[in-house]
Image (spheres, helix red, strand yellow):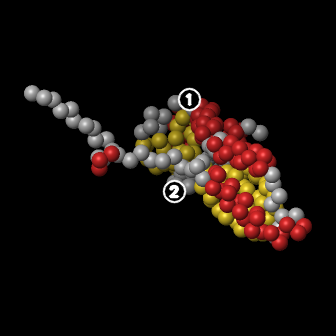
Amino acid sequence: MSKIQDLKRLIRANERIRVSEVRLIDHEGNQVGVMATKDAMAMAEGAGLDLVEVAAEAKPPVCRILDFSKYLYDMGKKDKEARKKQKVISIKEVKLSAKIGEHDYQTKLRNAIRFIERGDRVKLTMFFRGREITHIDIGKRIIARFAEDLSSVADVEKDGGLEGRMIHMYFVGKAPAKKTPLNGEKEGDSHAEIKNT
């Protein structure tokens, strides 16, 4: 079912408005005031438009005289625009082991930097197999190095610590630095030109 059909089901209009009186706004946006619903419907029909409930929670509900199909279209369009502007942040996982080689380490680091630069969060997982768990200090050193190598592009968001046979750490991209005015100037101040006379 489309978004417009969902809205059509949720928004009461015309004969679906079952209350005895409403606060009416006419098709030009003027407040008409509280009146009987049947009179408001007659006004809407006279204007060749619909009576649409725009604030159901108000007492009495606020209704407006307008073109219902255009209203639904505009609401659907606004919803689509809002969803377009929404940024979805995903979490990408990078897994390391205590016996990771230098080449593999550099590859994982490059991947983490790429994820962060495109706006994702990174979950670093250090896992220990078998007897490796007795050498947690090696794993912690690798994680500390990874955090240091990422420090130019990311901050540690959460250090999950050891959970079972794994250590988790979460990274998020650094916020862009705010520009600070020079020499104690306030924002918007401009330098006055000095002319020699």
Q: Which residue is mark 2?
A: 59
- Residue 92 % position (x, y): 74, 49
Under tag 1, what secondary structure?
A: loop
Residue in view at x 25 percent, y 37 percent: 191
Query: How many angstroms separate mark 1 from mark 2 (CA)?
Result: 26 Å
In the rendered view, would you say 116 is above or below 69? below
Instruction: Point out the image quarter for the C terminus.
Output: top left
Residue farthest toward the bottom in the current orientation of the protein: 134
Residue in the image at 59% along x and 34% along y: 74
Q: Residues within 10 Å of mark 2 (few under 14, many from 20)?
A: few
Q: Is residue 95 left or right of residue 131?
A: left
Q: Image quarter for residue 14?
A: top right
Question: Residue at coordinates 73% horizontally, 56% vertically from top-left?
Answer: 124
Which one is in front, 130 or 101?
Answer: 101
Front position among marks 1 and 2: 2
In this view, which residue lies farthest toward the front? 102
| Kind of residue at badge 2 | Lys
Name the residue beneath numbered marker 1.
Answer: 48
Q: Relative to 197, is 143 on the left or the right?
A: right
Q: Position of residue 7 (x, y in %)?
A: 67, 42
Say what amino acid the circle numbered 1 marks.
Gly
User: Does residue 115 appear in this view?
Assistant: no
Q: Is residue 137 above or below residue 193?
A: below
